[in-house]
Amino acid sequence: MKFGAMVCVAALGMGVQPGSGGDRVAPDPGSFGIKAVTRPSQDAVTGFNFSVTIEDVLVKVGDRVVEGQPMVRADATDAEASVELQTLRAESELDVQAAEKALELSQVEFQATKQAYEGGGGSTIELDRARLAAENAKLSLEASRQRMREQQIQLRQLQARLDEHTVTSPFDGIVESVLVDVGDTVRESDPIVRVVSIDPLWIDVATPTEQTLGLKPGDPAWALVRIGDEARLLRATIVGISPVADSVTGARRVRVEASNPDALPAGLQVFVRFTQPDQTWMDYFESQDASGAGDTG
């Protein structure tokens, strides 16, 4: 279950505690939970599988992209010509048609030779030669059809190679960086475009093992996100717990997923807890809701 609500908490630090009549200031965020950092739930750096020259850059930093959307195109003149030539070969039926006519002719000749033989006008060797010629023509037709299928497979291979001249987005997300310009020559596996998905956000929390023993995927979590002097409460869900504890720190990694409809950037400091915030925090959040500064989800 994912929770999308965000509660604006206002200024961080020590101040007037909940229950006073004036503006309420958040308690010390360090008392909220375990310190961690938000990160993209998906993060990919794309590139080409071979050396190319950049022909067109179709996106810029901050653009939203969808899965499969073209982002960068490379010069594909040679690949396009190869596909065009192979298309002619793969779609041509001339060889098959010629083989069909050859088979038809050999069958006519075999029947004529057979009739002549049965009428006493031909020899056994002539009949066998005509029969084998017909059988060979049939095999030639099958070979022509197989060559045509092979040409079609080669066309698909060349088309796939041509498609590799365009870098596309691997998932729905946001362009984080564009590392090339038109005219650049890039080598195999050079980074081209980085795409991230920040809705939802992931948070990997190094949690003391004793606190993880009662947790399971699907359990709720609460994350206090720091944004300068402001903080927001993200209601989240546990999506994974590492089966291995760190022998030095005694902690296990608990991955938390938080819906992010307001597109908060990844990389922010957060404090995460796996039990409902105590009364001090709940009173504070309720005061923010009452003042209209709270729920933005």
Image (cartoon, rainbow, N blue to C red):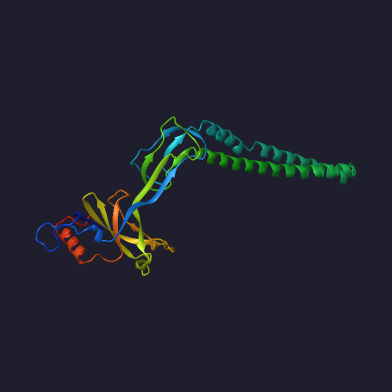
**Horizontal placement of 239 versus 279: left or right?**
right
> Could you tell me if residue 111 is visible in this image?
no
Percent across and percent down for residue 113 are 83, 42
Q: Is residue 221 or residue 61 the one in the foreground?
A: 221
Q: Is residue 78 left or right of residue 103?
A: left
Number of numbered callouts drawn = 0
- Residue at 36 percent across and 59 percent down: it is 206
Image quarter (top left, top right, bottom left or bottom right) of the C terminus: bottom left
Residue most extreme to the bottom: 214
Q: Is residue 166 visible?
A: yes
Q: Residue furthest left?
A: 21
Residue at 30% of width from left, 48% of height from top? Answer: 265
Q: Nearer the viewer, residue 190 or 47?
A: 190
- Spot occupied by residue 108 in the image (x, y as percentages of width and height): 77, 41
Quarter in which the N terminus is drawn: bottom left
Quarter holding residue 286: bottom left
Quarter location, residue 3:
bottom left
User: In the image, what residue occupies the spot 90% across and 43% down?
Assistant: 123
The one nearer the camera, 48 or 203, is: 203
Residue lying furthest front? 248
Q: Is residue 32 left or right of residue 181?
A: left
Residue 181 in the image: x percent, y percent? 41, 32
Vertical position of residue 152 compared to residue 283: above or below: above
Q: Position of residue 77 (x, y in %)?
A: 51, 31
